Image (cartoon, grey):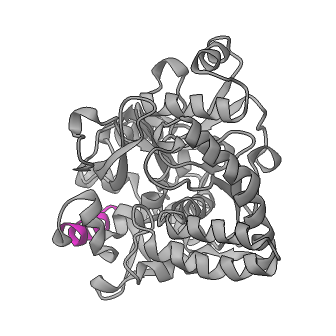
Amino acid sequence: MFEEANQQAIEKIRSAQPLLVDLKPAGKVISRMSKNTILHAGPPIKWERMCGPLRGAVYGALMYEELAESLKEAEELIENGEILFAPCHEYDSVGPMAGVISVSMPVFVVKNEENGNLSYSSMNEGLGKVLRFGAYSEGVIRHLKWMEMELGPSLELAIKRSGGINLKKIISQALHMGDECHNRNVAATSLFEREIMPLLIETSLETKVTSRIAKFFAENDHFFLNLSMAACKAMMDAAHGIENCTVITAMSRNGTEFGIRVSGLGDRWFTAPAPTAKGLYFPGYGPADANPDLGDSSITETRGIGGFAMAAAPAIVKFVGGTLADAVSYTKEMMTITVSKDYNFTIPALNFEGIPMGIDLFKVLNTGILPIINTGIAHKKPGVGQIGAGIVRAPMECFKKALKALVEKA
């Protein structure tokens, strides 16, 4: 019965058609969002247990929303119980690193044309001292305001003119051009620019506005990451909630805990302490400065790209560490814990093999092989930002807890 359910999930994932259809303030498209709602990456967590980067991003979001003018005012709001915290995943959305989404932030709207479900993600701010890594300086807030007031409305006009941008096609092409669409998005961002820039020009925006947007794209190779995440979320959600299915439909972390969701076990989270990535650090930083792993971006690995497709992106090892042989080995290893391969997304270096698809709870437990994730590394203190990038494995305890729940349900 498990095999039949898993095959049903695989067909849902394989046939999914994620299209970028809109861009709107979160409060206008994400149901149940309110002025005092703050969505975050990973499984549910209370303020008392939040890590430094997540706290920093919350501070920044509250000041960006003009709910607080200082850290003191932000903390008073939180301590008085006036802020509702919830996982992005539970609101059909995803956010990288701290993953914070507040009501005014523009979010991409992605529709799975095959299944009808929607997903949402924030826009990528760029690298360095940015909100998603826990920075909340005046410059960070000013940049977010520009994204809300100029970048967002401009892209919204262009996206509507497109009739829907095929994200699956972009990901497929990018894998042939050296990306794995998690920590390397050079090709995917360029492909997205090729689609969006002519549409932006057609909207008759002022030249200086178009120029600022083009410059932002040119300086932000990671812009496509959030689109990749939303596409993967839309594809994986199509396979969620299938009775007796042991396919993992979400892996995520909040900097304190790592959590997974299993298709046949509903919306329950199975958690364990978040591991710390091993990788390369920016000058002046090291492992002692690192926060445990965080972010919803591991939805890419859940779908079979990112760390699962590192064989397609040999240059990624210069960013996260390791060798070309390691990258190839990771992809081959992940094929042993997945249900199938997806030839919609192929890897040239592996003779155009399809990517690993559908992490199987039983296969992880039987082999002892844990899903691999490539990831950014945030400083453990709020306000500092990104300090490196590396590799991490999902903790086995999550999968053991899921198995126990499956047995209890039987």
Q: Is residue 331 magenta?
A: yes
Q: Which residue is more in the foreground, 321 or 391?
A: 321
The residue under the point 21% across, 69% down is 329
Q: Is residue 233 magenta?
A: no
Question: Which stretch is magenta?
Answer: 326-337
Q: In which image quadrant can residue 71 be found?
A: top right
Q: Which residue is more in the foreground, 231 or 387?
A: 387
Q: In which image quadrant can residue 17 be found?
A: bottom right
Magenta-drawn stretch, dominant element (helix, strand or loop): helix
Q: For this view, does 185 lie left or right of residue 166?
A: left
Q: Quick check: 384 above or below 150?
A: above
> x and y percent of residue 386 in the render?
38, 45
Q: For this view, does 49 lie left or right of residue 163?
A: left
The residue under the point 35% across, 65% down is 308
The residue under the point 82% across, 48% down is 28
Residue found farthest to the front: 208
Q: Which residue is more in the foreground, 71 or 175?
A: 71
Total number of numbered discs in the rendering: 0
Q: For this view, does 160 lie left or right of residue 354?
A: right
Residue 267 visible in the shown view: no
Q: Quick check: 154 above or below 104?
A: below
The residue under the point 58% across, 58% down is 233
